[in-house]
Image (tube, rainbow, N blue to C red):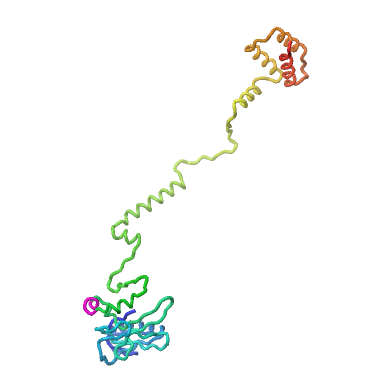
């Protein structure tokens, strides 16, 4: 976190009459002083500037250092990285899974410093062993918010999105409601179930031929297609004369088959 180069400020500025703008600016400074104090350091102004450079044992000398403040750590967690004269201007401490670095001047990171007075070792130290680097330039009016709505605003697709939402709502309404009134289904309504040919034939016999006439119909149908012998016809006549009504139809049928199939 790099601070902008500011003029020397007293730790407790005294407000003066008709100086609303100065009070507003001092409020920002007081906010940063309070935040840095919570981290275990004090932001102190440098009253006398003996050098416009900063020195470090890690990356050498930063040729142009425009900051007018320094840090005074009051906890042992901080490590001094660079000094301006005898004052600490870059400090670092462990923070979570990484570290927090405070710079009293942001000029070494500016475009001018990168073009004219670039300290490559200092820049490499900042981004060394980092998986990613995030540049926050919202204070310059440069920001980007990725997302569907950002693309819609960029390419003027607000009307298209509204049409898609309208079509989706109509589709949901169509699935839930219909313009044709729905009829109530009756559970007692007759239904026709499928049957095999044998079952249809049996149903037809049960509906059209009575039980007492069933054996006679079978004999007449058999005589139309079969060629019975004289002996079979004689046995058939004897069977008709001797059969009684008390015997079941199945029994009569089995007895008749036995008589017709006997060997002469």
Measuring 35% from the left and 75% from the top, which residue is drawn there?
128
- Name the quadrant containing residue 185: top right
Magenta stretch, residue numbers: 112-117
- Observer able to see residue 13: no
Measuring 71% from the left and 14% from the top, which residue is drawn there?
260
Q: Quadrant of the C terminus?
A: top right
Reply yes or no: does residue 241 show up in magenta. Answer: no
Measuring 69% from the left and 18% from the top, which residue is drawn there?
214
- Name the quadrant containing residue 207: top right
- Observer able to see residue 170: yes
Place of residue 220 in the rendered image (x, y in percent of width and height, measured from the top left): 66, 13
Place of residue 158 in the rendered image (x, y in percent of width and height, measured from the top left): 32, 57
Q: Is residue 239 left or right of residue 151?
A: right
Q: Please state which of residues 195 and 157 is positioned toward the viewer in this rendering.
A: 195
Place of residue 179 in the rendered image (x, y in percent of width and height, measured from the top left): 44, 43
Up the image or down, 138 lies above or below 217; here it is: below
Place of residue 84 in the rendered image (x, y in percent of width and height, measured from the top left): 29, 88
Up the image or down, 126 lies above or below 42; here it is: above
Q: Please state which of residues 67 and 77 is positioned toward the viewer in this rendering.
A: 77
């Amino acid at each position: 976190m790099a601070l902008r180069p500011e003029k020397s400020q007293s730790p407790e500025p005294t407000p003066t009459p008709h100086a609303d703008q100065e009070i507003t600016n001092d409020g920002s400074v007081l906010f940063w002083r309070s935040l840095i104090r919570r981290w275990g350091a004090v932001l102190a102004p440098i009253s006398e500037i003996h050098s416009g450079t900063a020195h470090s044992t890690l990356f050498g000398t930063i040729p142009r250092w425009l900051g007018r403040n320094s840090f005074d750590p009051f906890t042992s967690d901080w490590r001094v990285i660079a000094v301006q004269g005898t004052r600490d201007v870059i400090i670092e401490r462990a923070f979570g899974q990484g570290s927090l670095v405070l710079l009293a001047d942001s000029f070494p990171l500016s475009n001018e410093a990168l073009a004219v007075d670039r300290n490559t070792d200092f820049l490499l130290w900042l981004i060394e062993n980092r998986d990613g680097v995030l540049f926050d330039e919202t204070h310059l009016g440069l920001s980007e918010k990725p997302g569907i709505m950002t693309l819609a605003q960029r390419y003027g697709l607000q009307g298209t999105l509204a049409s898609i939402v309208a079509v989706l709502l109509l589709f949901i309404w169509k699935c839930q409601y219909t313009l044709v009134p729905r009829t109530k289904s009756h559970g007692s309504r007759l239904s026709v179930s499928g049957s095999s040919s044998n079952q249809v034939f049996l149903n037809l016999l049960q509906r059209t031929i009575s039980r007492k006439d069933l054996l006679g119909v079978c004999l007449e149908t058999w005589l139309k297609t079969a060629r019975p012998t004289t002996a079979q016809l004689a046995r058939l006549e004897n069977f008709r004369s001797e059969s009684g009504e008390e015997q079941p139809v199945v029994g009569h049928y089995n007895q008749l088959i036995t008589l017709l199939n006997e060997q002469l």
